[in-house]
Amino acid sequence: MLTLLIADDEFFILERLKRITDYPALGYNLTAAVLNGRDAMQIIEEESPDLAILDIKMPFLSGLDIAGQIYEKNLKTKVVILTSYDYFNYAKQAIKYQVFSYLLKPVNVDELKEILADAAREIGEQRQRDSQLKEYKHLRTEPLLQHLTPQDQASMDPDNKETAVTRAVIEMIQSSYGDPRLDLPCIAEKVGYTQNYISSIFKRNTGLTVVQYITQCRMNAANILLTIQHMPVNQVYSEVGYSNPFYFSKRFKQYFGYSPSECPGALASDPDTKH
């Protein structure tokens, strides 16, 4: 359930907005309804509601003042500006504050429902992107598994030993895929087993070769950098362990079926990606 705040300095308008529709049926919990901008801003800072419907003209802080503070403080609450026709052109100037939408007084219930549905969809998509970004950061910072001592290894049964070595290889790749020198010989040297042994047990335990898993980590990280962090393509390739941007573009297209520049959300500043 998403949380909703409504603020309007006209009592009867506020009361009507509280009852105009069945908010829970639309996926919202109306957590607060206040009569001035100061109280609205305090609730936004303390409780971080998912959506705030704010009157453009209120005591202490206007809806636009609040939208500006949300933008400057990088808060997550999305804003819908509530305005009369006389203020509508003025409200549209707030696009720089990334206001989500506008509602014209008197509020039409169908328009309100449509805006609530659009906001819910965008909030859900943003949460998914945030989750992916968190996963990416976790991959970049996850520490290496402490390798077993020779005495520990000697006392382990073969299955447990394979599992431990496989985990060590996975964690090494997850934490080091941004290093262009990372390959099977490098991993074998650090783990302390032969390349053939590592290749054999890794394939048996994961279904992938070591090279395939390195590529998978690099491609998934590249996709997140392009679509969530909007990093330019000509910077992404070096972040994920490639020294040649054209080779990176070729591998990316082989993996996803489209080039990095065609990736949704990618900035159009990549190098020539002819293959």
Image: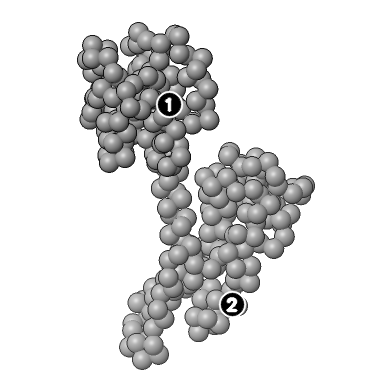
Colouring of the image = one colour
The correct choice, above or below, for 212 with respect to 202 in the image is above
**Percent from the top left, x then y, of residue 84?**
40, 11
Is residue 76 among what the camera can see?
yes
Three-letter amino acid code of the residue under disc 1? Leu
Q: Residue at horizontal 55%, vertical 65%?
A: 177
Please state the total of marks drawn on the protein image: 2
Alpha-carbon span between mark 2 and mark 1 = 56 Å
Instruction: Check the picture and name the quadrant holding the N terminus.
Output: top left
Q: Is residue 209 left or right of residue 2?
A: right
Q: Which element carries disc 2, helix, strand or loop?
A: helix
The image quarter containing residue 71 is top left
Is residue 119 among what the camera can see?
no
The correct choice, above or below, for 70 with respect to 210 in the image is above
The image quarter containing residue 159 is bottom left
Crowding around mark 2 (Cα neighbors within 10 Å: few <14, some 14 to 19, many 20+) is few
The residue that label 2 is drawn on is 186
The residue that label 1 is drawn on is 64
Of the pair 199 and 42, the residue shown nearer to us: 42
The correct choice, above or below, for 163 with respect to 250 in the image is below
**Percent from the top left, x then y, of residue 116?**
36, 23
Q: Is residue 247 left or right of residue 5?
A: right
